[in-house]
Image: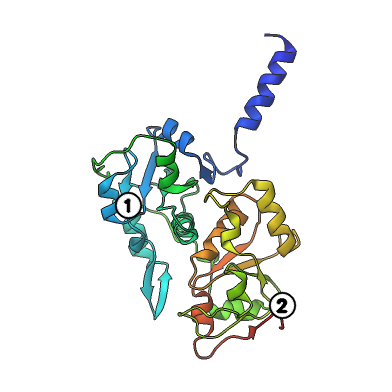
Amino acid sequence: MTRSRIFCFVIVLFFAIPVVSSTREIAPFVSADWLNQNSSAPGLLIVDVRSGSDYRKGHIPGAVSASLDSWAVNKNKLLRELPAGRDLLDLMGSLGMKESSKVVIVGKGVSDFDRADAIRVAWTILTAGIKNVSVLDGGFPKWLEDKKTVTADQAAPAPGEFRGKIDESAVASKQYVLSRIGKSIIVDSRTPDVFFGVTIESFAQKPGHIKEAVNLPAPWAFTKDGILRSQSELENMANEVTGGNKSKETIVYCGVGVYASVWSYVLTEMLGYKDVKLYDGSMQEWVMDPPGPIGIFGWH
């Protein structure tokens, strides 16, 4: 092979590989084609987080079932919170996860909420110490659209003890957020009508947003077809809101902590932000007595 051909081969190979952080062996999002080609790779675990009934109707061959309710629980009058540490580690062990596992999350993928739910599970697994976690881009609908194989045969996990440790530094409390107003970048991942107080969500009965927060809606991370936007598009969106300072502490929140996981995951796993926390209680907790300071219609 001539030197010029070798150079061209290397260039093609380079652009065929997704850019990921040095600690990763798989990309933060994978395509249906990639998963189809790698589904039997050693150490790869496919986790279907749709409902049990959807899973039984048909799923990706080899995928194990662990519905969303296993990954986000209601506690202390708050919706969709992280499970207790031991419960989360036990769940991961029951599915056969190890710290060295490569885990791909498959979600329902029909709505923006579905897409956020799948990413929320990936974020949760990250907090427990598995670095190689990924999300199937487009979810199960993309798998069907691409005419990949579907089975009704239920895969049996190989349970064991998961010995990870919850990284609490990735989760912000209400008191912590209160202490960081005016010091950190606070990102609201809800839609603009909710952020500005035009619409009020049922679980947070006060209009507006956390004082001095900026708005970066989670649905904007996806195309109209439900596919993740390109890395350059995501980078431009984030830079416009955060100023592109990847070292400054960034706290992401939403209504109950699910939409927030979209940008928390993208900022850390794709865009190289170094200090990102998710406020799990989010606006639901923020407006509870005593409520935190609120901005509305852009006034702080």
Would residue 36 appear left or right of 209 to someone viewing this image? left
Density class for disc 2 (Cα within 10 Å; few <14, some 14-19, many ≥20) is: few
Q: Which residue does the image show at 60% across and 33% down from the upper left?
A: 17
The disc at residue 182 is: 2
Q: Are marks 1 and 2 in contact (CB under 8 Å)?
A: no
Residue 50: assigned label? none
Judge whether residue 266 can be spotted in this image. Answer: yes
Residue type at the position of mark 1: Gly
Residue at disc 2, secondary structure? loop
Give coordinates of residue 223: x percent, y percent. Answer: 58, 51
- Relative height, residue 16 to residue 300 (above, below): above
- Residue 71's spot in the image, x, y percent? 38, 61
Quarter of the image with the N terminus in it: top right
Give the residue number, with chain letter if any, for mark 1: 93
Residue 77 position in % (x across, y down): 39, 81
Nearer to me, 62 or 124: 62
- Asked if residue 99 shows in the view, the reply is no
Please give the name of the residue rendered at 65% of the width and 25% of the height, measured from the top-left corner: 12
How many marks the image carries: the answer is 2
In the image, residue 248 lies at what x, y percent?
71, 64
User: Which part of the image, by quadrant, shows the C terminus?
Assistant: bottom right
Q: Is residue 115 above or below residue 157?
A: below
Q: Secondary structure at mark 1?
A: helix
Q: Farthest residue toward the top? A: 1
Q: Looking at the image, tell me whether mark 1 or mark 2 is earlier in sequence order.
A: 1
Q: Disc 2 marks which amino acid?
A: Gly
**Along the viewing direction, whichever of 193 and 77 lies nearer the viewer:** 193
Residue furthest toward the bottom?
A: 290
* CA distance separating discs 1 and 2: 40 Å
Left or right of 161 on screen, residue 235: right
Q: Residue at x 54, y 46 (%)?
A: 28
